[in-house]
Every structure is written in structure tokens, then in C-alpha cells.
Amino acid sequence: MRRIALLASALTLAATLVGCGSEEPSTEPPTDPTTSSTPEETPEETPEETPEPSEPAVQEIKIVFEGGEAPSVERVQVGVGERFVLVVTSDEPGELHVHSDPEHTLAYGAGTTRLPLTIGRPGVVEVERHEPAALVLQLEVR
Amino acid sequence: MDDWLTFAHGLGGPADLPIPPQLAIAGAVAALVVSFTVLALAWRTPRFAPDTGGRPAPAALQRLVDHRAFHVALRGVGIAGLAWFGLAALFGPDLLTNPAFGMFYVWWWVGLVPASVLLGPVWRAISPVRTINSLFARLSGSDPERGMYEYPTRLGYWPAALGLFAFVWLELVYPYSTELGPVRLWVAVYLAAMLLGGALFGSTFFEKADPFEVYSSLCAKLSVWARRDTRLILRSPLSNLATIRPEAGLVAVVSVLFGSTAFDSFRSSLTWINYTDGGPLSISTMNLLALVAFCVGVGVILAVGSAATGVDEGTRRRDLPAMFAHSVVPIIVGYIVAHYLNYLIEVGWDTLVLASDPLGRGSNWLGTGDLGRISWFTYHQTLLASVKVLAVVTGHVLGVIAAHDRAIAVLPKRHQVTGQLPMLLAMVSFTAGGLYLLFAA
């Protein structure tokens, strides 16, 4: 019985340590918009003709569909409740589904489309293209 | 809620954030340290004898659970649940707002685990297939316990393992798992198979072959509730766990349960998604292969870990994996808590809200339709991550203690310490692997 008690206390101690260790990452600010822009492959055929050069600190996430092919899936961190922009470059118009809660359906046209978005709940959110269906992006909202 | 779309996507939108790496490492180290502490310090004569220990439950409680009205009420709960599910699944809209999905994937599959760990063998008590079987037997004037044949011992838990695999295949591999047709078909096949089995072999069939009863009753061995003869007794979960009988197919059952949950974490990892994309095989074929690989992998690790020891003349080495399979049950439950806790609370609650309107007409029959949502854990991801690691480590510790006690009961004296090492490594690999998946997925 004493040994079980010993084990139990060792376990509690380990658990406390585990609990304490985990407090640290939450206290530091999770994302800062200055370092967060994570551009992937640069669109070769379409030079970015984005209309507005305003708001320098907004995070941009580029998604390029080349000849209907979806890029390989990447995971990008965005801040909870922070505005970011999905910059979609595609030959054909289409639709993105953002599986956040609540979900968003975002339409894009041929060429480059800027889709501003804000997600208010933490979690890993998948972004999928509709027709042809493909997972495009995972957003780590924290 | 109109924007809940049905599109090749599971129930419940965003996934939990991955656990921080330092937490995963701390958990793995804790598991490792505790494992060897148990090996070095714990008792040297078996403690968890199946036939002794525990104390009788209060007489009033015994009278309640033995009361006929209590049984009838529980059976009523099961039948009502099935009827409500049937109403939604047959006449409700084919949208994710249909509560049938949440009842099927969340209440039934995930909810069964905490219910059984807290309350005992819940599914056995409410199982609508048992109820229907005994009604049939009563109508035909026969005994529901007995069927036309004896249940073959050789089959053991294998049918249940197959049924559990069929469920996780539908949930994790089949691309149209969130359409009503496949869910209806699955339940119809399940009901037909169970009622046929019940007619052929009597109630023993449910004990061995109903995937949900086997799942629930295994988890219930981690509860404090047990029966000795007819007495209701309260006993420590660890000695309760030791009463799991090593039967054919038990290893397969625990392998499917643990392997599939691990695969569920793995399949959303970037590595796997990008690996399957653009390969020669379709994504669902790849997922099926990976699901099988995870289940078989768990089985092989368990088999090798438990059998790689010296044995007495009287013990067959190939019997060892089933003798040690019970010790994986706490690891499974710990990992399921970690993997599904927030999902069960959020989507389980959403399902209760949706269940008030099974036909999708805006009605509020249960009065739960205008309840709010519970998303507390979603906004406390650090606490959630700590709870997850704690659950995994607790499950691991209980598993290691259970395996230790079994080892000193069945292994010869001179192999009792060294013979445990491979099993210990197997368990550390399960736990470290589980933590890695919680971190990486």
C-alpha cells in the first residue's frame, strides 16, 4: 500500500511538473504579424498586380493553383481574431471552404484574388478547394 | 448554422491545437521514469487476484440496480436512443446538422468510453439489440440466454474486432462517412448481424461479438464496479482490470482500438497528407492501408513485447499476448481521453442541441434546441494540452502496473524482471508514439 502511495505521489509530482512546464508557452505572445508572412512558391506567370499597397502589417498567405493543380499542403500560423489575407492565384475561378467554426465559403476569380479573413477561435482549421476537391492549407490559429 | 457544409470532412470543424513539444517530452520522460520505478520498486507477489478483494456496495445501491424497474428503465433508454437515431437517420435531412451523425460518431463511439469507465458496462445494460433479442425470445417462448447453438470458443472476440474495424473504417477511411446513406446502411447491417447472432448463439453472442458491448465492457473493467456471483462490489480499477479474461481475439480488439485512434491523429498530419497526395493510389486506399498498418503494428508490438521472455514448461509463449492485452486497456482509454476530450464535449453537446430537431424542421421537441454551445476548452488550449498529457501518462502508469502484476503471476521467478522489459518497452513506445502524434498532428 505504501508503495502505491509512493507511486501516486511521484505521479502527482510529475503531473505538477508537466503542468508547470506548460504554462510558459501560453504567456508569450503567440504570433506577431511582422514575422508571420509565409509565402510559398512564387507565382511565376502572374506578377502580383494587387491593387492596394496599404496596411503593411497584415499577414498574407499565398495560394497558387497552377493548371488546376493544388500546391502541397502547408501549415501556417495566424493569430486568433487577427485579420489576414489569402492571396489566391488561379487560372480558373473557384471556391475555398474554410472549416473554421463558423465555416466560411470564399469565392475567387481567375487571376489573383485577395480574400481577407479573421478567425476568432483557436484550433487547426483546414482550408479546402471545392471542385476539384483538394486540401490546400492548414491554419494553426493560436 | 446553415453554413455547416457536407464536404468530405468529419464532424466538428477545427481540430485542437497540437500539444507543445516540451509538454510531449515531459510526458514521455515521466512515463519512462515511472515505468522503471514500477519495475524496480513494486511488489513481487501478485496483488490483483481476480477472485478476492473489493468490498460490497451499499445495500440500497444493490437493491436499486437489481430492481426490475431499473432494468426496464435502462432498456427503455437504449430503445429510445435507437428510435430517436432512426427517426433522424431515416426522415431527417442529409446535412451535418442532422443529429444522427453526432449520435452515431460521438455519443455512441466516443461517449461510450467515459460512460463505461464511470458507470460500468453501460452498453450491456442499455443495448437495444439485447432488448430486441429478449423480446423475440419471449415471443417465441424460448430463453434469450440460449440460442440454437453453443457460441464457438475459438471465435472469441474476433467478430467484435471485425465489427470495431468496420466502424473505424467507416469513420476514418470511407470518404462519404458524413452522408446519411452509409451511416444508415452500417447500422442496418450491425442490427441484422447482432439479431441473427443472438438468435443463433443466445446472449453470449453479444458478450463476445457485439463490438460496442465488447468495447464498453473492456472500458468498464477500469471502473470501480464489479459483480461477484450476484453481489455488487466496489473494487480498485486495477484489480478489476485483472479480471479481463485472455480469450481469442482480445489482442485484435485492443489493437484495433488503439491503432485506429492513433491513425486518426496521424491522418491529419502534414507529412501523411502530402505523401498521399498525387501518389499512384487514391487517398482512401492509402488511408485504408495505413489504418490496417497501425492496427497490425500495435498487435505485433504487443505480441512481441509480451512473448519475448523465458517461460515455464506449463506456459505456452503464444498465450502470453492475450494474457497481457488487458494492460493496454488503460493506455487506450488514456489516449482516447486525450484525443477526443474536447471533441466529445463540444460536438457531443452540439449534438444534444441538434437532437431536439431530428427532422430539420426548426422544431424543439426536447427543449434543448436553444441551449448555447460549450467551447471552454477551445479557448484554454494550454490547459487542454496538459489534461491530454496527464491522461496519456496516467493510462500508461496504470498499464505498466497491470502488466507488472500479470508478469509476476505468470512468468517464472528468474524471468520476472528481465521478462518484463520487452513489454515495458512496448508500452513506452505506445505512449511516446501517442504523445508524438498529439504533438505532430
Image (cartoon, rainbow, N blue to C red):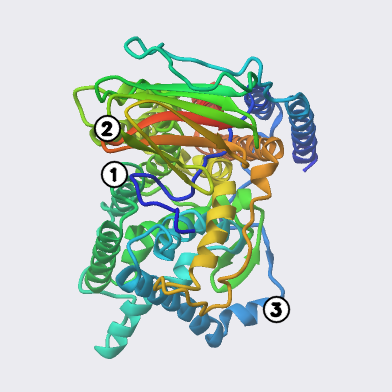
Amino acid type, label 1: Pro
User: Real-space Cα distance between discs 1 and 3?
Assistant: 51 Å
SS of the residue at dot 3?
A: helix
Q: Which badge, 1 or 3, comes first in the chain's sequence?
A: 3
Does mark 2 fall on the same chain as mark 3?
Answer: yes
Q: Nearer the viewer, mark 1 or mark 3?
A: 1
Name the residue carrying label 1.
Answer: B175
Residue B339 spot, x, y in % from top left: 54, 41
Q: Which mark is residue B283?
A: 2
**Residue B396 occupies quadrant:** top right
- Residue at x 63%, y 81% (from the top left corner): B64
- Residue at x 67%, y 77% (from the top left corner): B61
Q: Nearer the viewer, residue B210 or B61?
A: B210
Residue B371 spot, x, y in % from top left: 62, 67
In this view, B114 is above or below B148:
above
Verify CB contact (< 8 Å) between mark 2 and mark 1.
Answer: yes
Q: Nearer the viewer, mark 3 or mark 2?
A: 2
Q: Chain ID for label 3?
A: B
Q: Nearer the viewer, residue B19 or A140?
A: A140
Q: Nearer the viewer, residue A89 or B35?
A: A89
Amino acid type, label 3: Ala
